[in-house]
Image: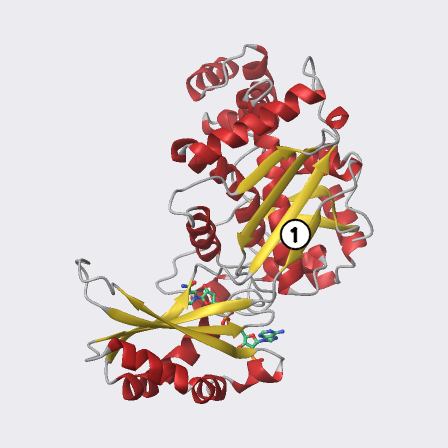
Amino acid sequence: MNTSRIPGFYNMTVEERRKILAEQAGFTKEETAHLSQANPLSLDTADNMIENVIGTYQLPLGLGLNFLINGKEYVVPMAIEEPSVVASASYIAKLVRNAGGFTTEATDRIMIGQIQVVGCSDFDLAKKALLREKDMLLEGANAAYPSIVARGGGAQDLEVRILNDDSGSKYGQMLVLHLYINTCDAMGANIINTMVEALAPVVEDLTKGKVYLRILSNLADRCMARAKCVIPPELLASGDYSGEEVRDGVVHAYEFAASDPYRAVTHNKGIMNGIDPIVIATGNDWRAVEAGAHAYAARFGKYSSMTDWYADDEGNLVGELELPMSVGTVGGSIRVHPISQIAHKMLGVESAQELAQVIVSVGLAQNLGALKALVTDGIQKGHMALHSRSVAMAAGAKGELIDIIAEQLINEKEIRVGKAKELVAKTKR
Ligand code: NDP
């Protein structure tokens, strides 16, 4: 994309938006056709993706605009059914852009494979045997998936833990081998699972125990991405609220989430509102990302806020988000689903590391969007106005009537389906 700022995009028709996007992203004729097609994911492809297929399920695909991350422009594809998320992400991205944009970083893409061993007669000896044969085990893992080694990745290290070592534990003692694998630009589940399954017989031999589970861990805490924004208070002023008031409100809202799991879970749901749509649009496994993110939010033994918000010495509002981000630009359904391929092209990311950094930036933006609304007018004002169209449609409005009913609902300050049904019925009399 040339720029992620497309003035007036909201007011264009879908066709006008597609035309601009296709020009900017350099779509081929085929890609443009996919975007305009009623069912881009064909039944045939779907039938080969999962089992017992009876159809396909569609979601709206919108564009998060205005994102400036490490000085680079991004147009963010977002697949989501909830109104106001795309608008809020784009609004905050513009605000952060005026403050210089997001800065991000990511670790190497090291994923974890686990091998569970039970029934060892001496767990300490079993652990020593595995550590002694570390090089042989790493070689064995890499021999099971040589192509990832050729790409510069592969199994790079291992660790061994003994669980339930404490005689007071109600669970049986077991040994867990962690294999640390660089999966390059793939999420890596299949690469990892292939490696740990291949190692299992050798691990049984060395430990004299029995191997049960051999699978990746979705707590991908060595495959991290971080985003940060620093916003001067004057950019935060909103209506009757001064920038300082908004900044302090956001910090208090964060402190609430950091202290209380009941609030943290809703706070974090708002962050995932930004993260899931891009994970879904890019063909990635959003259950894996969700599981890893929530587990990471509880890493200190108590479920807490995924983000940090504070005021720095200059009075700026600073936001930071750090999460495991096990996503890929290849593998799984990424190159199978035609819209996922288009999503990658419009994003213009060159690696999984870069994609992970865009995703956490969107999550951070979404969090600020929700907190800013919550500490000022409340969430309903903006949300319900955007929700009014869905309410009108749920009440049976079609075509031009959708906007007419939606506007009446907003004017009468009663955005609910019962009211919309009354209004639709009136138009039929
Ligand atoms: P794949 O099995 O599709 O593996 C990715 C493949 O992409 C590699 O085998 C590699 O093959 C190829 N490739 C091409 N270019 C690159 C590159 N630059 N970097 C890395 N690989 C490259 O997918 P994953 O292993 O990523 O597995 C993801 C899938 O696993 C998802 O669909 C997920 O839902 C699923 N899954 C998730 C689980 C979980 O989260 N708990 C459990 C089980 C499955 P080659 O080198 O031969 O070209």
| Type of the residue with mark 1 | Val
The correct choice, above or below, for 177 with respect to 406 in the image is below
Q: Is residue 13 at least partly visible in the picture?
A: no
What residue sits 44% from the left and 21% below the top? Answer: 417
Could you say which quadrant of the image residue 165 lies in?
bottom left
Image-based side of 313 in relation to 422, left or right: right
The correct choice, above or below, for 252 with respect to 268 in the image is above
**Residue under label 1:** 358
Image-based side of 204 in relation to 104, left or right: left
Q: Secondary structure at mark 1?
A: helix
| Residue 24 percent across, percent down from the top left | 80, 53
| Residue 395 percent across, percent down from the top left | 45, 25
The correct choice, above or below, for 369 with respect to 403 in the image is below
- Crowding around mark 1 (Cα neighbors within 10 Å: few <14, some 14 to 19, many 20+) is many
Could you say which quadrant of the image residue 243 lies in?
top right
Q: How is the image coloured?
A: secondary structure
What residue sits 49% from the left and 26% below the top? Answer: 391
| Residue 213 percent across, percent down from the top left | 30, 72
| Residue 79 percent across, percent down from the top left | 56, 47
Q: Residue furthest right?
A: 2
Q: Is residue 49 at least partly visible in the picture?
A: yes
Q: Residue furthest top?
A: 412
Disc 1 residue lies near ligand 1 with CB under 8 A = no
Label count reads: 1
- Looking at the image, which is closer to me, 389 or 216? 216
- Looking at the image, which is closer to me, 161 or 152? 161
